[in-house]
Image (spheres, rainbow, N blue to C red):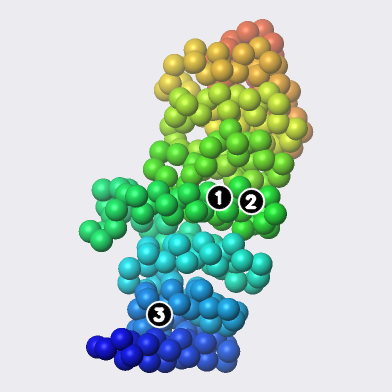
Amino acid sequence: MSWLSLVVVGAAGLGSMRAAVERGDVDEATRQGVLAGAGVVEQALRAPDRATRLAGIAAAPRVESRAELLDALAVAAAGPDRRTALPAARAARTIARELAARGLPEGLPDDLAPDDVVRWRDAWATLARRGDRWIDLRVVALDTAAALDPGGTGVDLGAALSDPDPALRQAALAVVPAPTPARMRAPLAGAVISDTDAGVALAAAATLCADLPADPAGPLLDALGGAGLTRLRVLVTTDGAPRADVRDAARCLAADGSPASTAALRAIRGALR
């Protein structure tokens, strides 16, 4: 097919996708995108008008070679239009999780390289760190980066736990791998000690302590130190604290075994059942 023919076919595909969205038929827009292929869908994602971008976003998780659309989706998600930015981020998260389920980097298709995954991860991590973006977008961007980062969180955990928005800090805790890597103990313990949001601090403790008693207690207790254990005793006895977080965080108190920690465990006996 000649270059001119490719242009004509691409324009026709874009027009069909846009027309389907304009009449409210997203399924048809997706079908047209799948028929047109990843190249046309990428053009749609970079289009200046909302309807065409929405059509590209709808088709992106279904088209062949969809992983290659993660760059264009990141551009769309970073744009000023919330109505396309959020769907673009969710489409990227779907694609990233599919890649992760195949195993990275071993399960990559032959036409993709580990460096591609690193580039995509970094693009989505950059978006997650942007304090001028909507928090729900940043959380989805973080999820996407984490899916592309086997054994990690997609971003520097210490930096994420220093973010001003507690929702982003909670999201960073939610993507910490299990079992928790040793390199993440220090930032988690720091959050237990100093996070101004009690819910975030308790979630950090739960993440840190959840692997006990399978893991040796010494390194975890050393990371917490006296200040961390003191804060933890307060956190687990706070009214309304999530029971699951209380149970996991209490493992560190049980491992500590001091009179103060034992007293805190007695106070929350009902939550441990």
Q: CA distance from mark 2 to mark 1?
A: 7 Å
- Along the line of sight, which residue is nearer the eye, 200 or 114? 114
Q: Residue 184 in the image: x percent, y percent?
A: 51, 29
Secondary element type, mark 2: loop
Q: What residue is shown with label 3?
A: 40
Query: Front-most of 38 and 266?
Result: 38
Compared to residue 2, the image places residue 44 above or below, namely above
Q: Residue at x 68, y 58 (%)?
A: 134
Disc 3 versus disc 1: distance between alpha carbons?
26 Å
Label located before the other in sequence (2 or 3): 3
Looking at the rendered structure, which numbered label has been put on residue 126?
1
Residue appearing at x 37%, y 63% in the figure: 67
Q: Compared to 166, does 186 lie above or below?
A: above
Mark nearer the N terminus (3 vs 1): 3
Do labels 2 and 1 touch, CB within 8 Å? yes
Amino acid identity at mark 1: Thr
Q: Are marks 3 and 1 in contact (CB under 8 Å)?
A: no
Q: Quadrant of residue 166?
A: top right
Question: Please, what secondary structure does the residue beneath circle 1 have?
Answer: helix
Mark 2 packing: few (<14 Cα in 10 Å), some, or many (20+)? some
Q: Looking at the figure, which quarter contains the C terminus? A: top right
Identify the amino acid type marked 3.
Val
Q: For the point 71% across and 44% down, which residue is it? A: 165
Mark 3 Cα within 10 Å, few/some/many (few <14, many 20+)? Answer: many
Q: Residue furthest front?
A: 3
* Residue 144 appearing in the image: yes
- According to the picture, the residue beneath numbered tag 2 turns out to be 130
Q: Tell me if residue 43 comes above or below residue 180 in the rendering.
A: below
Distance from Cα at disc 2 to Cα at disc 3? 29 Å
Q: Quadrant for residue 271, please give it.
A: top right
Q: In the image, what residue occupies the spot 61% across and 53% down?
A: 138
The percent position of residue 11, horizontal first and vertical second, equals: 43, 89
